[in-house]
Amino acid sequence: MFKSIFLPVALLGAATAAFADEGQWQPHQLPQLSSELKRIGITMPAAKLADLGKHPMSAMVSLGGCSASFVSPDGLVVTNHHCAYGAIQRNSTPEQNYIVNGFLAKTRAEELPGGPNTLIYVTEKVENVTKRVLDGLSPTLSGSERHALVAARVKALIAECETDKSTRCSVPAFHRGLEYYRIKQLMIRDVRLVHAPSDRIGNFGGDIDNYEWPRQTGDYSFLRAYVGKDGRPADPSPDNVPYRSKDFLVVSAEGLKNGDPILLAGYPGRTSRYKLPSEIRFARDVDFPAKAATITADLATIAAATKDNPAWDVRYASVAKSLNNVLKKTQGLMDGFARKDIAAIKDVQDAELRTWQQSHAGANKNLLTELDAVIARDMALQRQEAAWNEATHSDLLKSARTLYRLALERQKPDAEREGGYQERDLSFIKARLTRLEQSFVPSVDEARFKAALGRYARIDGAVRPQGIDALLPTEAALPALYRSSELADTAKRLAWIGKDPQAFRASNDPFIALAVRLHDAGMALENQRNEIDGNLERVIPQYMAAVIAFKTSQGKPVYPDANSTLRVTYGTVSPYAPRDGLLKGPFTTVEGILEKETDKDPFIVPAALKQAIQGKRYGVFKDKALGTVPVNFLSSADTTGGNSGSAVMNGRGELVGLNFDSTYESITKDWYFDTAITRAIHVDIRYMLWVMKEVDHADNLLKEMTIKYPKN
């Protein structure tokens, strides 16, 4: 029987269990998997899943970092609580704290603005443009020249695609630069917060339970997309109307059981399944330990600087939440690498590839030697870039550097500007600079910058970027910098947009002056990065072509690494054994919430929720086998960051859950998919519906959605 062991070349020879649900597949690849989907019980035709214009793929959307899906014809979107956290925080104050208390709009008029950074992207078209990006590139080009030429072609393809500000196009690389696809998306700019439970439900367990199992977290929220009266995306306005989504998911409260098949669709961020052993060792021994130490220190600084000030704590809540999530994942990666020597596994598999490459007729015999050399240079530069990030770790400085770079880039024709600084990017730059006021306090930023400069001073001088030490302020000089700068004021910060470079060079604002002073050193690093990236972009696609040829010879399709584009994965509801004698999952229940209850965050249980559990008011959401309401469940689906909020569907394409996390033992799946222990964690849709009915009384939303209830 055909087995779903579609392992990248770096994983050749890994486990060949029959239920290895590995792969973050491009929708057009799904017909290749038709027999496997049928085998696990997916009844939807693979050809239908491959069509972005048909249900259910037409209901999937991106939030630009998270995934979501339409669940009503009136633009109602469901996603994770942590994905809507920025909008929740934006509307919260110490007096009206929607983070703690939750929020529900009973009418459309009560819905709250999500803010300029809350956007919804609807994928409309995907087309292969590899030929237009790569044809005719001379092998004699330097790395920088090649990188610049590819970037110019990509920008031209984007400009050709973006006919108005309602459309957002991108041309991401697939298979590490072997293929390029142009993605056309409708960008909805008026997004409003509709409903979010208290974080004592939506973030129950907090950072303690993050990546852990068992879990009892109701990680869900609702947003709504609004457009102009003509049906096209428009700037936020009270005159806008709900977006009429082409399709939406039917919600199924009929439930799942152990072994049931699931489909999962969303926008996974980044995976590294095709990394070489040397890259694994660099991440394990150098990059991840340094990152963990930096984040730990930064979190301690934020905690100390916001202590005893509720308003400051609210401002930095989202920042701290994000940092804690990255830290937990980084620590999990280090623990995973210690538990299983993935580098050694890949050594064996890499040797198999090299043997095949050398014996294959017509193969470039020098390819892998050249690749090793470029990767070594890449890793050396990464250490310098990490040092640079420590030296410039200030939100105020980052804002000043962005503004100065924008002024310089705007001296060029739009097509020649660096990506991220074209006219199409101006609204995003304004949004970032505006949003800073939600998560910024000068004294906290000063404390973070001071601590980072102290860490930078302890970095080996050979690793620091050349020439920047003399340009940096001393720790003692920081108070004067923050007292004298006007960039902390949003209006004055935004007023710098549109000024010419000479105005920056003549400025007495200390952060503007620091940004100008550091610019050349930053560009020197960027130029080195472009040279190395250009060489990687030349060599790695040849490597990936060899990978695909080798896999094809074995009759196995190859999925590309995740790159924030729409993907589909599949699996089954599955328990797992993290160690000998211990079996976990696959369901948790509301009783587990009370078992974890304490009188301290993050295990405080809202009174209304506690009463509903104790009163066993389970109604139609009671699982017959469990005898209660399920909260979270596990599946073997292949997920990563960016899959947060992804729709989890049953074999008929109905919404049965939301993806929101992975088990701690699964964190290394970004590098290596271990079929025995890799599990994704999902909110059971029955818990979401039950809380909405029994706790938050969101009857208006329950009525708006199309819900299939279990038959008696």
Image (cartoon, helix red, strand yellow):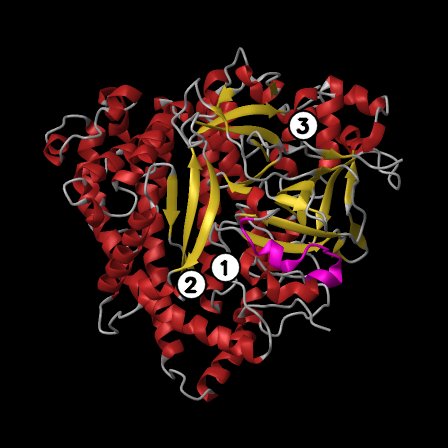
| Above or below: residue 97 compared with residue 476 | above
Badge 3 density bin: few <14, some 14–19, many ≥20, Cα 10 Å: many
Q: Amino acid at mark 2?
A: Arg
List the residue tagged with mark 3: 201
Q: Is residue 47 magenta?
A: yes
Residue at 56% across / 80% down in the picture? 553
- Camera-near label (3 vs 1) is 1
Start-end of magenta stretch: 37-53
Label 2 vs label 1: CA separation?
8 Å
Q: Earlier in the sequence, mark 2 or mark 1?
A: 2
Q: Amino acid at mark 3?
A: Ile
Is 467 in front, or is 684? 684
Does residue 341 appear anywhere in the picture?
yes
Tell me the quarter of the image containing the N terminus.
bottom right
Question: Element at badge 1?
Answer: loop
Q: Is residue 223 magenta?
A: no
Label 3 vs label 1: CA separation?
33 Å
The picture places residue 190, in percent across and down from the top left corner, at 44, 27
> Residue 561: which disc?
1
Which residue is situated farthest in the front direction here?
A: 230
Q: Is residue 205 left or right of residue 236?
A: right
Is 57 in front, or is 81? 57
Whether residues under marks 2 and 1 lie with C-beta atoms below 8 angstroms apart, the answer is yes
List the residue tagged with mark 2: 176
Badge 2 density bin: few <14, some 14–19, many ≥20, Cα 10 Å: many
| Above or below: residue 601 compared with residue 375 | above
Q: Amino acid at mark 1?
A: Asp
| Above or below: residue 607 compared with residue 136 | above
